[in-house]
Image (spheres, rainbow, N blue to C red):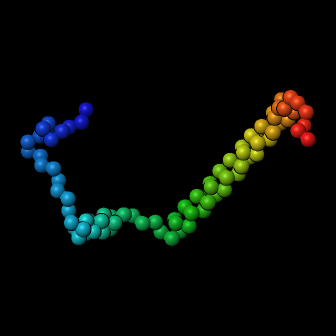
Amino acid sequence: MTQTNADAKPGKEPQRRKGPVTFTKEVVGELRKVRWPTRRELITYTIVVIVFVVIMVGYVSLLDFGFGEAVTWLYGTFGGDGGGQAPF
């Protein structure tokens, strides 16, 4: 159930939109609170991500190859020749 304006609490007014200057100041203030990674951490995290992506690409490639071979085998075994003579 959602709250409509009629159901809103009387002491709580909806927040007004702020201007672009205030928004920018608040964004800069929030970015100052961020704990940025060191160069060493950044390199470590990047290597971990690249290794994970390479492993996942290999895994998905193997699955793709396996399913492709399975479908090819199924069509070769159970597909038949179309039930008739060649058109030419």
In the image, what residue occupies the spot 55% across and 61% down? Answer: 45
In the image, what residue occupies the spot 72% across and 45% down? Answer: 64
In the image, is 56 to the left or to the right of 42? Answer: right
Where residue 70 appears, as percent x and y from the top left, is 79, 37
Seen in the picture, residue 26 relative to 62 is either above or below; the reply is below
Where residue 80 appears, as percent x and y from the top left, is 86, 31
Q: Which part of the image, by quadrant, shows the C terminus? A: top right
Residue in the foreground of this view, choosing between 68 and 24: 68
In the image, is 10 to the left or to the right of 50? Answer: left
In the image, what residue occupies the spot 47% across and 69% down? Answer: 38
Seen in the picture, residue 11 relative to 78 is either above or below; the reply is below
Seen in the picture, residue 88 relative to 14 is either above or below; the reply is above
Residue in the foreground of this view, choosing between 55 and 10: 10
Judged from this view, the residue extending furthest toward the left is: 10
Where on the picture, by quarter, is residue 81?
A: top right
In the image, is 12 to the left or to the right of 23? Answer: left
Where residue 27 appears, as percent x and y from the top left, is 30, 65
Residue 29 visible in the snapshot: no
Residue 32 visible in the snapshot: yes
Q: Which part of the image, by quadrant, shows the N terminus? A: top left
Where residue 77 appears, as percent x and y from the top left, is 86, 31
In the image, what residue occupies the spot 24% across and 68% down? Answer: 20
